[in-house]
Image (cartoon, helix red, strand yellow):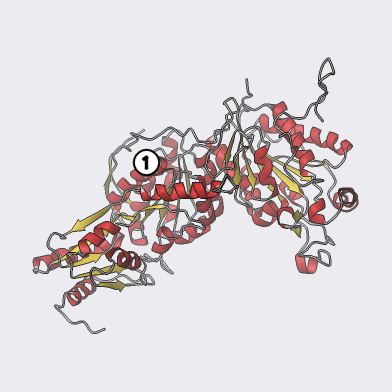
Amino acid sequence: MTTAEATPGKAVFERPHVFVEEGTPWCQGCGYGAWSRIIIEEIERANPAKLVAAADIACLEYMHEIIPGDITIALHGRSVSTVRGMKMAQPEAMAIAFQGDGGMLNEGLNEVFHAAASGQNVIAILGNNGVFGDTGGQYTLAAPLGHKSPTTPNGRDAKINGSPIPLAEMLAMIPGTAFVGRISTHDPAYVYRGQRILRKAMEASMAGAGFVFLECMTTCPTGWRMTPVESIKYHEEVILKEKPVGIIKDWDPATHPAVEAALPKLG
Amino acid sequence: MEQKDLMFMRAPEALVEASLRAGCQLFCAYPITPVEDMAEYWVKRCGEFPGALPHFTESELEGGAYLYGFAASGGRVAFASTGTGISLISESLGWIMDAEVPCVLFNFPRAGGLSISQADYNQATKAPSHGDGKCLVLAPMGTQEAVDLTMEAYYLADYYRNPVMVMCDYTLGLTMEVVEFAPMKTEGLPPKDWALTGDRGRARRGGLASAAPGGVTAANVATGVDESFGTMSRGERSARRRADKYKTFPVRYEDFFMEDAELAVVAYGTMARMILPVLKQLREEGLKVGMIRPITLFPFPEEHINEAAGRLQKVSVFECNSGQMVEDVQRSVNGRCPVEFYGRPGGAAPSPQEIEAEIKRLVGKVEVPA
């Protein structure tokens, strides 16, 4: 994956320098690696002078190994609120919260709504794979109906387990949100498109737009009890059918003025 | 900015005023009596203090997260509630104590309803959260002392990088008195070079808490997560260091008529304040009774009580609960003299006559039917 040493001339493709040599810290075949990589690339492109971040206890806590800034592991479900506190103390910082669907939809749902309503200029990133991956794949409130997991052995049944929460669509309804998008990074075309959506999200936050929400649809072959190839098929045929990628709410400065001044850049 | 140094005000508002003067920038207060007055006073007054944010905390859970995030990023922050709110932020408190982030907590314990209570003594001193962490707990007896201890709480929190709780009670929450504000002491406070400021220009370094996983590439990492580290886990090393830190917390207490006392009452907060006039009257009657008032509930003035117990015939603990601090007193006395207990749980408070009758019973002056 690194640029060949012997090749003279301009490097056109490199691994982000903050990635550790071993690669990403997640399970083999996990979808988190692809979108965390483009997040780091876009952080480096946006190049904020200050970056504060928080990542939930669970799979995403390993974000601390790769984020090029100050990051804390927050309590499960509390990353958005924790990063709001960090942002209040460091108003010139870009602020990013990383939460999985268990942390955001199950444990801390009210807090992401309050954050959206506040309009505070923070970026909330939801890594959504429909399961508690870190603990073995139990379903979360984001899981599609019919999803089989150790706690829904016969498939998720709305009568027993309730129905999935369309969080991104609900957040888009809140006036405080400046930008809401959904991406997937399970194949190169989606990575390409996802990175451009992410770039718009980062640019909005750098411009001081307000609350930015990005849902990253992710496979979890370990938690889903599938091979990576099977998980991508399931992801395309089941998950993305109900959750198409794209910009759900684009930032329009004319109707949603920036809540703060543009964030300073490094250097 | 108008700087009145002498004011006549309610205790909760006085504590907010003290917080503003101590440089507190974010005050997390969710409405629960008497804390709503603090939220209102903060919003009304914070505009006059540069850096103080008018933010109103949406819920206690978020208050706990703000405490952690705001303080971790270098801000000065406080949280106020009753014991129920302390229960709600308990999880965050564990995280905060593990990561060693400074903050100040105001606690107005209530019984089932709106009345005096000391029922949250154990919560504050023994188990503010899961884990091995401890808060430094200060228990004022009146509004002036509460103001002084508040100013000091911010200092102690920063100095020890630990939550400091100002343990009030509902009666104090309804008290209105003249209070004087002195400037906050700041000498000797180290710079917050551990703070997660987000500054990407500086060199990468270890992190906020010694409990942070080692060998990571992020600029700063704060976490309560353990990771195996040599023969002793990093978690154990850090927990041992914190336990040593708790032993250095300052112990404070106040003695009343203890020089020749044969019976000592131990009481804190408003209970001590209720006992004091009765004690003065009994002294005038010639009874050799005194009082030890712990000002720090954690750390508890163990050594002082043990030393005093060697000269006493009896110790009695007065509390507005079913018996909580009495366990600390028994532990401190350690068999050197009998320890009795007089408790009024469920929001009840003794009248001066009841206090007098109980003390007289203890010294064998009057037999009170059980």
> Which residue is found at the position 49% from the left and 50% from the top?
B239
The N terminus of chain A, quarter of image? top right
Q: Residue furthest front?
A: B231
Q: Give percent across and percent down for residue B165.
A: 40, 52
Can you say whether B142 is above or below A119 in the image? below
Q: Residue furthest bottom?
A: B369
B44 vs B84, nearest the viewer: B84
Q: Give percent across and percent down for residue A171.
A: 71, 47
The C terminus of chain A, quarter of image? top right
Q: Is residue B212 visible?
A: yes
A45 vs B173, nearest the viewer: A45
**Circle 1 sits on which residue?**
B155
Q: Is residue A187 left or right of residue B303?
A: right
Q: Give percent across and percent down for residue B185.
A: 32, 37
Question: Based on the displayed image, in which of its 4 quarters is residue B113 positioned?
Answer: bottom left
Determine the chain carrying the residue at label 1. B
Please rate how many residues cluster around mark 1, counting C-alpha atoms within 10 Å: few if below 14, some from 14 to 19, many from 20.
Answer: many
Q: Is residue A251 visible?
A: no
A41 vs B14, nearest the viewer: A41
Can you say whether B44 is above or below A266 in the image? below
